[in-house]
Amino acid sequence: MNFPVLIRTYDAPELCESEILRYAGCKSADESTLSLLHECLNELNGKLCYKVCFMKLPCTVDGDTADLSAFKVRSKALARNLSKCKNVILFAATVGVHLDRLIARYGHIAPSKALLMQAIGAERIEALCDIFCEDIKNEEHCVLRPRFSPGYGDLALDVQKDIFALLECHKRIGVALNKSLLMSPSKSVTAFIGIRSTEE
């Protein structure tokens, strides 16, 4: 059975500076840190992309195995997360490669700037995932389980191979998977989101 891969492109989600600073490990920010943060944000203005590709799959759970029709995943943690879900959204999201290039450049000449770029990337990809999940919740009129990514709990990173093959992430949104199962661009996410009826 074939399941369609859908693609969405978003405008930049609302930015949260306090969340960026949290990712950067700043409990409080002085003027110079805020100034550097704003400099980084200005440099990134209009340079990031916000893309998601995804697929809705049927889901049945038997013991430690989640059967998604397209493939099966053995993980006690994922099976528990998807318990009572009849469907799952499998998705990949990215904010593009531009951040990686800047992080690499500033890693050699301005480590503090590289750190803030890393933190901005973490906040941006999470904001993208949040807005995508909110869209799915509204469209499906459902309750969503927390998104669950490979590498979390006992969900093996090897599952990335199945996800990338099914979603064709490189073709659809420009995200590649290397031999170490790391994604490029690095500010990318893959995850399962269980869908449960609001009546349950």
Image (cartoon, rainbow, N blue to C red):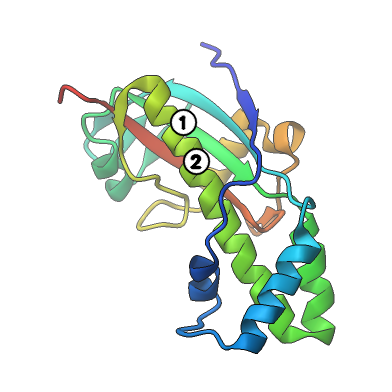
Quadrant assignment, res 89: top left
Classed neighbour count for the residue bearing mark 2: other residues with Cα under 10 Å, few (<14), some (14–19), many (≥20): some
What amino acid is found at the position of numbered circle 2 in the picture? Ile
In the depicted structure, whether residue 135 falls above or below residue 150: above
Residue hosting label 2:
131
Horizontally, residue 181 falls left or right of residue 22, namely: right
Residue 195, percent from left and from top? 33, 29
Q: In the image shown, does 157 or 176 lie closer to the viewer?
A: 176
The answer to whether residue 100 shows anywhere in this view is: no
Secondary structure of the residue carrying tag 2 is helix
What amino acid is found at the position of numbered circle 1 in the picture? Asp
Evaluate if marks 2 and 1 touch, with contact meaning CB atoms under 8 Å apart.
yes
Q: Residue at x 62, y 38 (%)?
A: 164
The answer to whether residue 10 shows anywhere in this view is: yes
In the depicted structure, whether residue 87 falls above or below residue 22: above
Q: In the image shown, does 132 or 195 lie closer to the viewer?
A: 132
Q: Residue at x 72, y 54 (%)?
A: 185
Q: Residue 135: which numbered mark, if any?
A: 1
In the depicted structure, whether residue 70 falls above or below residue 124: above
Classed neighbour count for the residue bearing mark 1: other residues with Cα under 10 Å, few (<14), some (14–19), many (≥20): few
